[in-house]
Amino acid sequence: MDAETRKALSVAARAARPFLFTTSTFKACVTRIKASTQHYQRALHSIERRAVSLQLRPAPKGTRASVLVDAPLPAMIDPWAVDIASLPDDSRCLCTCPTCAGAKKVVCNTCDGRGRVRCNACGGDGKVQGERGLKNCPSCRGRGDIRCERCSRGKVACTTCAATGKTTAWLEVSASPVQLVRVHPISAATSIHTSVDSPEDFDRPPGKYPSALTDDGVVQDVPPQLAPKLLEHDRVITTRIQTFTCPLHVVEFRAALSSGHVDVAGTHRTVAPTSDWTAASRRLKLLAA
């Protein structure tokens, strides 16, 4: 048994102490120790995300209905095929308000168009406690609801068009940077790499990683397993890929007529969450019994 394997065994034995294993008892239960090296990669994709939105404001006073056209549709515009700066002017038009369809009023959000809301005084029951028992609520007179003070018959003035039924409409493209991280493969090595899927973790000092950083750079060709999941109008600007090498010792043991394993991974010999402690848990229950 080489020095690294002995160290991994000692780490596994310490991790087994909560299951009432002494170091010697755990080592006696060990059946095999497998040493290997795991490799994993992660990609940081810098993406520009674009979206087209419809902008509206009340039309100028005196706008005639005869000059109104249909509002432009954002879905008909490819945000990567237009001039972002000129699109607002190119698409600007006068149109019937799409919010109220020219009716100048919209359904009241407070009462959902019913014109009445639940009475807060009685909680909608219509009854309140009086000196001699329950009585009709004086606020709603026993109805359980009261007239909505925000609207008139379930309708309120349309704020999009300032209750004119007409709007000035145009399209705008918003562009925002997005960072996506992909990791492959998921293994014991990646389970001990905290923040492995965090963009900020890419600039951690190399010596602070739990595994050895063997390659780091911007690439053009991205392996399929590291390709990002993009929305319709996303475009990848750059991709940075890091490659890690992680030593792994799998300490197999047998207890309580079943088997388990302790995965000791990384340059700092960390017990990975991928370890299987089922046999140790069964042994602990038998000892308790």
Image (cartoon, rainbow, N blue to C red):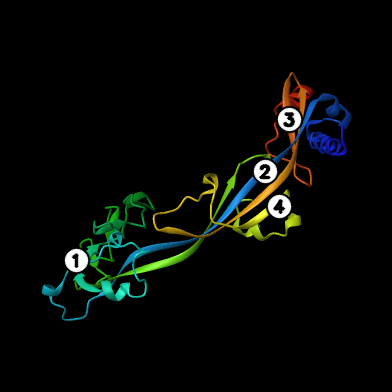
CA separation, marks 1 and 4? 57 Å
Alpha carbon separation for disc pair 3 and 2: 20 Å
Figure quadrant of the N terminus? top right
Residue corresponding to mark 1: 70
Tell me if mark 3 has few (under 14), some (14-19) or many (20+) residues whose alpha carbon lies within 10 angstroms of its own. Answer: many
Residue 126 screen position, x and y as percent: 31, 51
Amino acid residing under circle 3: His
Residue that numbered label 4 is attached to: 213
Q: For the residue labelled by badge 3, is the local secondary structure a helix, a strand or a loop?
A: strand
The answer to whether 11 appears left or right of 97 in the picture is right
Q: Quadrant of residue 225?
A: top right
Which is nearer the eye, 123 or 83? 83
Identify the residue shown where x is 11% and y is 73%: 66
Dot 3 or dot 2, earlier in sequence: 2
Measured Cα–Cα span from mark 1 to mark 2 = 57 Å
Residue under label 2? 39
Badge 1: how crowded within 10 Å, few (<14), some, or many (20+)? Answer: few
Mark in front: 4 vs 3: 4
